[in-house]
Amino acid sequence: MKDSKIQMQILIALGLGLKRNWHIFFGILAGVFVGIFLHSHPYPIVATLLNFIGQVFIRLIQMIVIPLVVSAIVIGITSIGDNKQLGKFGTKMVVYYGIITVAAVIIGTILALVFKPGLGAAHHIAATTASKVQASVAAAMAQQQGHLLNMFLDFIPSNPLNALAHGNMVAIIVFVLIFAVALSKVGDVSRPIVSFFESVFAATMKITDWIMFLAAPGVFALTASAVSSFGMDIFASISKYLMVLAIGFFIQMFVVYPIFLKCFSKVSIWMLYSAIAEAMMVAFGTASSSATLPLTIACCEKRGISHKISSFVLPLGATLNMDGTALLQVVAVIFLAQAYGVPLDPFLLIQIGLLAIVASSTSAGISGAGLITIALILNGMGLSPEQLVAGFAFLFTIERVTDMMRTLVNVTSDAVVVAAIADNENEINYDLFNNPEAYEEIA
Ligand code: ASP
């Protein structure tokens, strides 16, 4: 009895002494175990409570995303100042994000062609209760029916306040980018408004610190809710598909990013991963790059990457750079093509790859967005309407687990690119960045 009391005290002391990223890590682990248990022993009250805690956490961070994105971009662009430098950063950012996304698409295509996860999977797809998700499928399809050009047109907000009210991230960013460039051109009169946004940014960062107290319980609750809804049986039924995805994400994180950083910078991937550990875990738990953005910015800035670079590159990355999503989209589409016997000639593969790059970057950084935009690729695949609905419904049933994985990859690559650009521009404080012991806690 006494022993167990002492053990408990030691555990608590250890827990309190550990850094927050360990708390979040244990939150994820505990969430997986509790989720597995709840899947086989459902307790509606516990499920409701977990869902509530998870939603409180997600909503609190979502609450500050828009003020944060707007203020970060205004400060970032006005601090860069001259057009030439801005153009240089912008071009570099697009090229770097492009390289990483093209690598993801190639890796996904090769893995799906080599492992052929879709062969013989038609019966799993047929066994899916498509009726459960019919409504979401129909809505998703309808949303993607419009012409590609119209989709790009929607990126230009005819009313920026409307875009703000609807949280239409790409449209908001387009407006803020133009607005911030204009501010940097008008000289001293821009000072009051830039100061205003500096205050907004500082306050949102402070709120991020506070919200981080909820990170471990929030991520625990989100993970437990997610795992309890899909259980572990899912891994048995479509293990090959999930295995291909997991290998693809692993290669992105442990082969592509290290090679990329070696080629374009002197940033150590391990230092970067320790600097952004909390953001990576929150990305996994929330399955939303946008919701993780405040934390990604806080991790980068508090651990040595300059504000000038991260405030400009990270919000754009969280909205436009979705290499994990692109990888999932090519694997999922090839999976369905294999299941339904659609011949995959090189032209079709190139079409899938190119559309995945467009579809992924137009996906919002929120949970489930990448599966909606996949309709853009599926529509031109030559599947019958019934196959389309059944295939889509099947992907929906295993959505959350793949979303958690791909969001982790999306957020990590945002930080990889920001670190590379900051290195190129001498905007990393390496004394701090390479010394995890000295890292300041978020909060
Ligand atoms: N959930 C992903 C993200 O926020 C987007 C997606 O659904 O693929 O990065």
Image (spheres, rainbow, N blue to C red):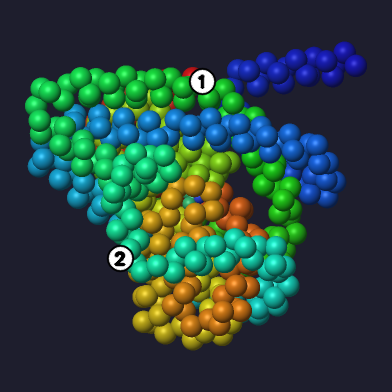
Where is 43 relative to 56, above or below?
Answer: below
**Label 1 Cα crowd, 10 Å radius (few <14 / some 14-19 / many 20+):** some
Q: Position of residue 298 (x, y in %)?
A: 40, 28
Residue in the picture at 55% in, 34% down: 59
Question: Which disc, if any, is residue 210?
Answer: 1
Amino acid under disc 2? Leu
**Label 2 Cα crowd, 10 Å radius (few <14 / some 14-19 / many 20+):** few
Front label number (2 vs 1): 2
Q: Is residue 407 visible?
A: no
Q: Is residue 10 visible?
A: yes
Where is 249 relative to 353, above or below?
Answer: above
244 with respect to 194 (left or right) = right
Q: Of callouts 2 and 1, which one flags the residue occurring earlier in the amino acid sequence?
A: 2
Secondary structure type for disc 1: helix
Q: Position of residue 140 (x, y in %)?
A: 52, 63
Residue in the picture at 34% in, 24% down: 201
| Contact check, label 2 and label 1, Cβ < 8 Å | no
Q: CA distance from mark 2 to mark 1?
A: 42 Å
Residue in the picture at 47% in, 74% down: 379
16 with respect to 106 (left or right) = right
Residue in the picture at 56% in, 49% down: 404
319 with respect to 281 (left or right) = left
Secondary structure type for disc 2: helix
Q: Position of residue 434 (x, y in %)?
A: 36, 29
Which residue is tagged 2? 149
Q: Position of residue 364 (x, y in %)?
A: 43, 50
Question: Which disc, if any, is residue 185?
Answer: none
Where, by quadrant of the figure, is residue 167 drawn? top left
Image quadrant containing the N terminus: top right
Amino acid under disc 1? Trp
